[in-house]
Image (spheres, rainbow, N blue to C red):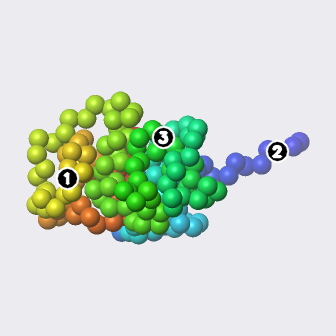
Amino acid sequence: VEVEPADPPAEQDRERFRDLDGVPWAKNYIETLAKAGVINGKREGIFDPESSVTREEFTKMLVLALELPAAETEAGFSDVEEDAWYAPYVNAAAEKGLLQGYDNGTIGIGASITREEAATLIARAADYAGCEIIPAEALTFEDALEISEFAADAVRACQGAKIIQGNDQNQFLPRNPITRAECAKMIFCLMDLL
């Protein structure tokens, strides 16, 4: 009598990342997005939640979260190499108006994305997807005056939608690089709105 081999452990029964103890608030966001294929670890079993996220990494996550189709044309940023792994994601995000370059024609490949820049892209993505967000009436962060003018409305929208919040001192830290754990929360909350 032939016996079928036992099934391997179900994906949900295995610990995907073993370095999330320091960010218990983000563990569900990270594991859920990893299972959905929106985010990856740095290497087998390692997510590296406290490291920063580059602009192209954030763009890839956003494109995957929104399931954007491939772009029909190249965005034309001077620092995006045509055959780079991130090029299809950058082109897709730019074509939909989610991603805009700097005045010098670059997108800042390799640079860490700041918290206010991430909020701006999230707000654009929500708008693109047709999500109705009621912005916060006013920015209530202690460092609200440090938020750049270009990002203020987006930060208000993300605060109103509870996609972002301040730290223990109620600071938003707009120009700080966003961490991988914080990024996972923002992307998860955006997908939840969708």
Quadrant of residue 173 within the rendered picture: bottom left
> Which residue, given by chain and number where applicable, does mark 2 sit on?
3
Where residue 53 appears, as percent x and y from the top left, is 42, 63
**Identity of the residue drawn at 35% across and 38% down:** 126
Q: Does residue 69 show up?
A: yes
**The C terminus - image quarter:** top left
Residue 31 position (above or below residue 41): above
> Which residue, given by chain and number where applicable, does mark 3 sit on?
95
**Identity of the residue drawn at 33% across and 66% down:** 177
- How far is mark 2 from mark 1, CA to CA? 66 Å
At label 1, counting other C-alpha atoms closer than 10 Å, the crowd grade (few under 14, some 14-19, many 20 or more) is: few
Report helix, strand or loop for mark 2. Answer: loop
User: Is 69 placed left or right of 168 in the picture?
Assistant: right
Report helix, strand or loop for mark 3. Answer: helix
Where residue 42 appears, as percent x and y from the top left, is 53, 66
Circle number at residue 177? none
**The N terminus - image quarter:** top right
- How far is mark 3 from mark 1, CA to CA? 24 Å
Q: Nearer the viewer, residue 153 or 103?
A: 103
- Please, what is the three-letter code of the amino acid marked with disc 1? Glu
Which one is closest to the eye, mark 2 or mark 1? 1
Q: Nearer the viewer, residue 111 or 188?
A: 111
At label 2, counting other C-alpha atoms closer than 10 Å, the crowd grade (few under 14, some 14-19, many 20 or more) is: few
- How far is mark 2 from mark 3, CA to CA? 53 Å
- Please, what is the three-letter code of the amino acid marked with disc 2? Val
User: Is 2 placed left or right of 100 in the picture?
Assistant: right
User: Is 133 placed left or right of 54 in the picture?
Assistant: left
Where residue 96 appears, as percent x and y from the top left, is 45, 38
> Which residue, given by chain and number where applicable, does mark 1 sit on?
149
- Please, what is the three-letter code of the amino acid marked with disc 3? Glu
Q: Does residue 31 show up?
A: no
Quick one: label 2 or label 1, which is nearer the N terminus?
2
